[in-house]
Amino acid sequence: QVHLVESGGGVAQPGRSLRLSCAASGFTFNKNGMHWVRQAPGKGLEWVAFISFDGSNEYYADSVKGRFSISRDNSNNTLFLQMNSLRAEDTALYYCAKDVEAIFGVVIDSWGQGTLVTVSS
Amino acid sequence: DIQMTQSPSTLSASVGDRVTITCRASQSISNWLAWYQHKPGKAPKLLIYKASVLESGVPSRFSGSGSGTDFTLTISSLQPDDFATYYCQQYDSYSLTFGPGTKVDIK
């Protein structure tokens, strides 16, 4: 059974940084691409970033490009999201999610419960 | 970038009703479309992928159709567990895009 557990959320001031982590278990982590998806309060789902199974391909939403960086540690089954230059509009629940494919993001078949990021002065 | 729209934004229905949600892409995405169900406080759940393929374990009252730019999600007989928000999502380009969501609530 796939299990994704996010951590690292919290309160940060505008312009500061946070690093989210996602511990994965229940599947062969190094065979699947992984995503971060967020949901701002009262809003819908917004895709944030994708990384391929081996970390060689990364794709980002325009809203975070140049500020956020996705990475993975396949030896420790962990996904990361480095968030720099945070803005108030980055306030959201951040989900770690597993793709069915390895190289390109297509369909998400498993999600974590999310970690809350609040950007406020 | 490909934009996704959904209609209606909110839908009030009763148990047993047939429910249809529409999703439209700003350009053709062939059949590269998925549908998710999301309940408050829970992780989203994959229902359908490739526009019409039912994910394993999803009840057969859910079905999807469409190709190109226009897609539909149909619930043939709404059950109490189906009250939730539904999102379409395209995967035709390198980036994924979700629709704005359709909330199905109790009439």
Image (tube, coloured by chain):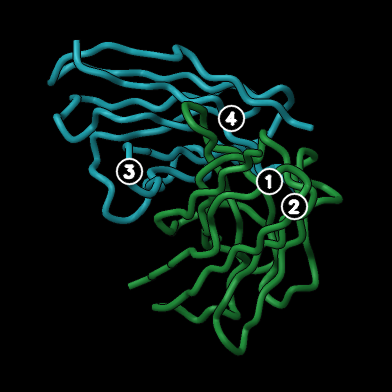
Chain colours: A green, B cyan
How far apart are the alpha carbons under marks 2 and 1? 6 Å
The amino acid type found where label 2 is placed reads Arg
In the visual, does A32 lie left or right of A93?
right
Q: In the image shown, does A30 or B39 lie closer to the viewer? A: B39
Q: Which residue is mark 1?
A: A13
Q: Are marks 2 and 3 in contact (CB under 8 Å)?
A: no
The amino acid type found where label 1 is placed reads Gln
Q: Secondary structure at mark 1?
A: loop
Which mark is in front, 4 or 2? 2
**Residue at the image position 16 percent from the left and 15 percent from the top:** B14
Q: Residue A16's mark? A: 2
How far apart are the alpha carbons under marks 4 and 3? 32 Å
Report if residue B31 is visible in the image: no
Q: Chain of mark 3?
A: B
How far apart are the alpha carbons under marks 1 and 3? 25 Å
Q: Residue B41's mark? A: 3
Q: In the image shown, does B75 or B41 lie closer to the viewer? A: B41
**Residue at the image position 36 percent from the left and 18 percent from the top:** B20
Q: Are marks 2 and 1 in contact (CB under 8 Å)?
A: yes
Whether callout 1 and callout 3 share a subunit is answered no
Q: Which residue is mark 4?
A: B67
